[in-house]
Image (cartoon, grey):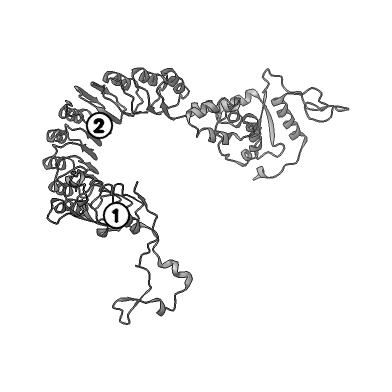
Amino acid sequence: MHGHQPHPVTPSRLAAYSDALLAKKGKRRGNYNCGRCGQPKKGHVCDLPPPQSVTDSNSAAVTPADSSTSSAAVTVTPLCTVRQAQRQQPCSNLRRALSFDVREAPDSDDERGDDEDMDMDMDIGSGKLPMSCLWEVLRRLPPPSLLSAAKVCKGWRDVSKNLWKAAEELRLRVQAKTQVGFVGSVLQKCPALVRLSLTMESDMDSTMLACIAFACPNLESLEINMCEGSSNHVTGDELGRFLAEKRCLTTIKMEGCSHLGSFVLCSNTLSTLWLSDLHSLSKMVFNLPNLNEISLDFSRQENDCTDLTSMMDGLGRTCPKLQNIHIASLQLSHSVVLSLAAANLRGLRMLSLVLGPEITDASVVAISKCYSNLELLDLSGSSISDSGLGMICNAFPETLTRLLVALCPNITSSGIQFATAQLPLLELMDCGMTICDSDALYPTSEERSDSELQVSPSSKLHLTYQKLFIKHSRLKKLSLWGCSGLDSLYLSCPNLNDLNLNSCKSLIPEKLVLQCPKLESVHAIGCQGVLIQAVQAQVSNDSDSLENRYSRKRMADGSKRVRIPFSFNQQLVDYDKSSWKIQKRRCRVVAE
């Protein structure tokens, strides 16, 4: 309250400001005023005691006085007292101004009264820009721009230096000819770094991994993404040593792990492990007792000789806290699923077994018996049928929210309709390339001719067309990409916001009905132009619904409602016509 009221100028207050100013800038030559009180020297005898002699030029600091005192608002304290106060309160105003730290909001009126002095100190060091603004601007710059900003002046260099010191997350793109020493020098600027993401345009090797281990002692999360043309030469032994040395590491995600060969991973803190592009691993040992999520993406080569059955047995023994499992491999089979069922991972919530053509309905039975609390199930690329979908619906009716069965040629529209009807909590469903006709996807030379448009009703292409009707109250995302055997689609999903119809070439515009008021995006790449126009007409905001077009009134007996035309309604006013329309969100149709 008192910080916003003007104070009268008293001799003691004037002397305090004068001493503070001299402490900062020093006494200038040719001054005709007293160095203690500031009054003219001619005929003046100063009653104030002389200041204490100290060796440092900054021998005094200005600190706000207690609001309860009425004699003076600012007092002068020696440097030793200021240093003791800094030890007790490391984020004092003086320390914050000198180190360019982020300025915190004052908690009392006295601190608000001292904001004017803080702004003056910050303007001197930052080129007429408040330090809080400079901090917010520079901390949003990418690393190369921040290095360039440090060359502007001393104030900017100090701010950028403290930004590097305070950084907890760093994302770098390592170009093709960048040396490891330069990356190490950048990482050493960030002693508090805990999250690091590298996009490698050059090759990744053990030297770069050792540089990361040395420069980032407190690293908790590491992500390495490989660009096209670059390769990862890190071996399994080098990766195992890196994990053993980094005792704070909780997350590691690495791409291009084709040279691992074999590995033994031991860590008591690691909770998330993502490895991609694996190939022909001769030995896999996971000694990770706190691992919660694992993702192993193998190469799409048929000569992969990795023993996934032994790997599943090892996961069950050494990783008892696993909740999310994602494995993508052509070697997935029913025996691998049986090993996973025998592992008895009680906390498993998300299971993704992708590209396993030997996974059948029997595998679904094994999964449903051992894991009844799954929230996500991804069996894309498997050989399950409509019977397998029925088993999934019977096993997880109260828990399953995401179901992905893309690239499953044995599933029909009837199985999809049954799954959406029996899973009330379903929010995401991917059925891409399920209702698919091979003749439509790979037409012959005869079908590319002009007579392609005239297909007889008895042809095979006509017999494979299917209809899909989905009515669900909680479904938010539906993917039907590549369903070329689908000609009719009816959706009544009030919460659906994302629909994928890419490459649905056989869908007839007259047989498309979208009753989805919250639809935000429709993907229709590869569809016919007539179908795209039909989609735009149904989701456009310009198409007004006639549901609330007219007002309604009950009959005299109260039996039913009837709509009253405008000419008979005496209560309608021109400015109320906007309320007749149903407000709909804008929907984006992606056609290119």
For mark 2, what is the residue?
A: 297
Q: How many marks?
A: 2
Q: Position of residue 580 (x, y in %)?
A: 41, 68
- Between residue 232 and residue 187, name the one nearer to us: 232
Amino acid found under the numbered disc labelled 1: Leu
Farthest right residue in view = 43
- Callout 1 crowding tier (Cα within 10 Å): few <14, some 14–19, many ≥20: many
Q: Residue at x 31, y 79 (%)?
A: 558
Q: Residue at x 26, y 22 (%)?
A: 260
Give above or below for 491 relative to 404: below
Is residue 517 at least partly visible in the picture?
no
The structure residue drawn at horizontal position 12% and vertical position 33%, both measured from the top left corner, is 335
Furthest residue toward bottom: 556
Q: Earlier in the sequence, mark 2 or mark 1?
A: 2
Q: Which one is nearer the viewer's eye here, 566 or 70?
A: 566
Residue at left offset 77%, top offset 37%: 10
Residue 266 tag number: none
Secondary structure under badge 1? helix
Height in image: 331 above or below 266? Answer: below
Circle 1 is placed at which residue position? 531
**The N terminus sits in image quarter:** top right
**Based on the displayed image, in which of its 4 quarters is residue 243 positioned?**
top left
